[in-house]
Amino acid sequence: MMKWGEKPYHSLDYMLRERFGEKVYKVTLNGGMSCPNRDGKLGTRGCIFCSAGGSGDFAADSSLSITEQIDRQISILSAKRPIHKYIAYFQAFTNTYAPVEYLEKIFTEALSHPGIVALSIGTRPDCLGKDVVTLLSRLNRQKPVWVELGLQTIHEKTAAYIRRGYPLSCFEDAVRRLRSEDIEVIVHTILGLPGESTQDILNTIEYLNHQDIQGIKLQLLHVLRGTDLASDYEKGLFCTYERDEYISLVISCLEHLRPDMVIHRITGDGPKDLLIAPLWASRKREVLNLLHHQMKESHNYQGRQTNWQIN
């Protein structure tokens, strides 16, 4: 029996209300870090889809202190609605790619803020040294710490094309080490990577069903201005999804995901001033409304195509 509120999938909003007793919002933070795919350790141009702002196109100004970033975003969000609890989300680039002393300083500052109830850290599996995991484990005993890993795909050919820079075994090792410290893991996947079929995507979903992860982000492939992916798109080397194609794909992914997996994202919207394709992605609310309507009308729900049972 489903128990996810009004939605036919285990949404982040539902999980947060269950855990914290009310709606919780994210504040996106910038720790001023880089990435091994940009500073020359692995490469200098980033992943093929990555804009100049990295994964932090919507993150705060890194010239501000962490407390100032939090307070500024809380001021904007609380002016629109009554909010009492927030998640500190370190989003821009690779947020464990710095000396552990610096990480401890900024993560502790975030967790010390009275409005913050959890810490979420976007990073790479190959940037989680033993000292970093030890730090995260200690912080996890103060308030919940979640680590978001950018896997994107399980297919090595695609991983090489997007310049991910690490093998699948590195991801599996990172998950094991984080989970041994009871740190929750959220995995980023991209739907629509060039050369991947629907079955390739579902193979990634099935693989993740068998990993000890607690959440997933289903991200639509965006083509952003200034990226190497944009060059390939403009050469006609691949096409992006039409809206209805994407909605059907997401429904299939949800039906093949085990039902306890928390869905942290189901589409995504790139910066409008950078977005080249698909342009319909900028109408995020419309996409979500259509998705929910179609799932309700067709009686689709998360886990329907699996043998997993909801506890």
Image: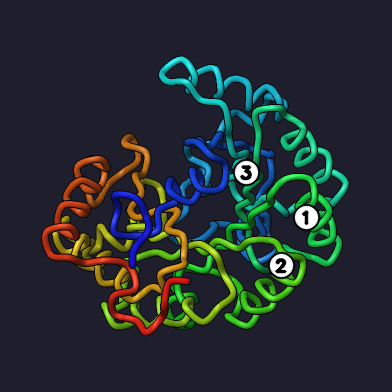
Name the residue beneath numbered marker 2. 178
84 lies left or right of 300: right
Quarter of the picture holding the N terminus: bottom left
Q: Quadrant of residue 4?
A: bottom left
**Mark 3 residue element:** strand
Closer to the chain start, of discs 1 and 3, is 3
**Mark 2 residue element:** helix
Q: Quadrant of residue 213?
A: bottom right
Question: Which residue type carries mark 2?
Answer: Leu
User: How far is disc 1 from disc 3 in space, using C-alphas?
Assistant: 13 Å
297 lies left or right of 249: left
Closer to the chain start, of discs 3 and 2, is 3
Residue 149 image offset from top left, x and y in percent = 58, 62
The label shown at residue 136 is 1
Q: Is residue 147 above or below residue 207?
A: above
Residue 194 image offset from top left, x and y in percent = 32, 71
Question: Which residue type carries mark 3?
Answer: Phe
Foreground pick, 229 / 55: 55
Foreground pick, 217 / 115: 115
Q: Residues within 10 Å of mark 2 (few under 14, many from 20)?
A: many
Closer to the chain start, of discs 2 and 1, is 1
Q: Residue at x 60, y 80 (%)?
A: 167
Name the residue beneath numbered marker 3. 90
User: How far is disc 2 from disc 1 in space, using C-alphas?
Assistant: 9 Å
Q: Is residue 64 above or below residue 248?
A: above
